Image (tube, grey):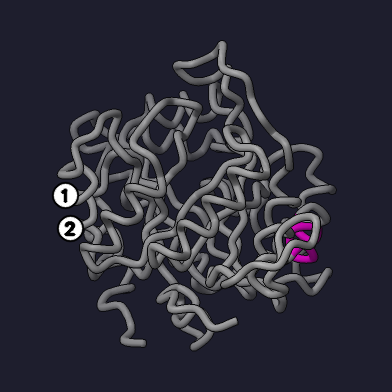
Amino acid sequence: MKTDSRLKRVLEKGHFAVTAECGPPKGADPKVIKSKGKILKGFVDSVNVTDNQTGVVRLSSLAACVLLKKEGLDPVLQMTTRDRNRIALQSDILGASALGIRNVLCLSGDHQSFGNQPQAKGVFDVDSVQLIQLVRQMRDNGVILGGDKLSEPPRLFIGAVANPFADPFAYRAIRLGKKVAAGAEFIQTQCIYNLTRFNEWMDKVRDLGLDEKVYILGGITPLKSARMAEFMSKQVAGMDVPDEIINRMKSIPAREQRQEGLKIAIETIQALKEAQGVHGVHIMAIEWEEAVPQLIEAAKLFPRPQV
């Protein structure tokens, strides 16, 4: 099925893709998401819009995607199974396609107990792998779950996430294989600080031949401070920040630590550009969108290709 996704065109033509995350505001002001889009426009191929990340209520991902689309960007709709049952998921998938959204990232989502609505009921009617299958079936076969035929199938480039740093490590590449078999076409990974562990995961990915079946984009989050590095190491589940990275940040005066965080991110991007089977990077700047253009230019990923 043909899509209009810029991200898909960039990857299919063999370019090293660049995507970035864009968190919607905790309010209804459209200017917030538009201003973030203006910062990123021209520097990235597509912009991920998070879906109530960490279970915190924010402007809806779908609404924010439409706002960014109107600003001339290629949004990636992040969709979690935490908050919607299969009826709502399929309805929103159709709605997104009808509104011109051409990329979807399928996730389970952070558990609601982590957010500002801990008493909310998590839905999890389907899991992330089933959501991938569901979107693929709707797009390629033109039917919903149960077999009812769609009058018009959605046109979406289908993505998923992978965490090379979660346990058990031996299962991580196998789980990626399940997502690829379900129909994922691009993968965005957890933030990479431990390149040794990431490369070990890529060895397993290549052994399974998955790098030839799916486009893999390595996750990048520039550190703002040594304190942030320590917090992510100790408090964020599934994150791997080695002591050498924490100590490197600590060795720098506090006022210069953001710049050091950018240097580490640039070095990681350069390493990923050389890694066999890695097709791009996904930058999650966490409310530091101003750093993204600087990072992309320094990593020699600008200008972006014309496709």
In this view, 117 is above or below 164: above
Q: Which residues are magenta?
A: 176-182
Amino acid type, residue under disc 2 in the picture: Lys
Residue 38, which numbered label? 2
Q: Choose between 116 and 84: the one closer to the eye.
A: 84
Q: Residue at x 54, y 13 (%)?
A: 118
Q: Secondary structure at mark 2?
A: helix
- In percent of width and height, residue 251 lies at 34, 32
Say which quarter of the image contains residue 147.
bottom right
According to the picture, the residue beneath numbered tag 1 turns out to be 35
Q: Choose between 242 and 62: the one closer to the eye.
A: 62
Q: Choose between 24 and 218: the one closer to the eye.
A: 24
Q: Is residue 177 magenta?
A: yes
Residue, far top: 119
Q: Residue at x 47, y 64 (%)?
A: 97
Q: Main secondary structure of the magenta part?
A: helix
Look at the image and tell me in which quarter the N terminus lies. bottom right
Left or right relative to 267: residue 168? right
Asked if marks 2 and 1 touch (Cβ < 8 Å), the reply is: yes
Left or right relative to 248: residue 89? right
In this view, 293 is above or below 90: below
Q: Residue at x 28, y 35 (%)?
A: 25
Look at the image and tell me in which quarter the C terminus lies. bottom left
Q: Secondary structure at mark 1?
A: helix
Amino acid type, residue under disc 1 in the picture: Ser
Label 2 crowding class (10 Å Cα cut-off): few <14, some 14-19, many 20+? Answer: some
Q: Choose between 239 and 104: the one closer to the eye.
A: 104
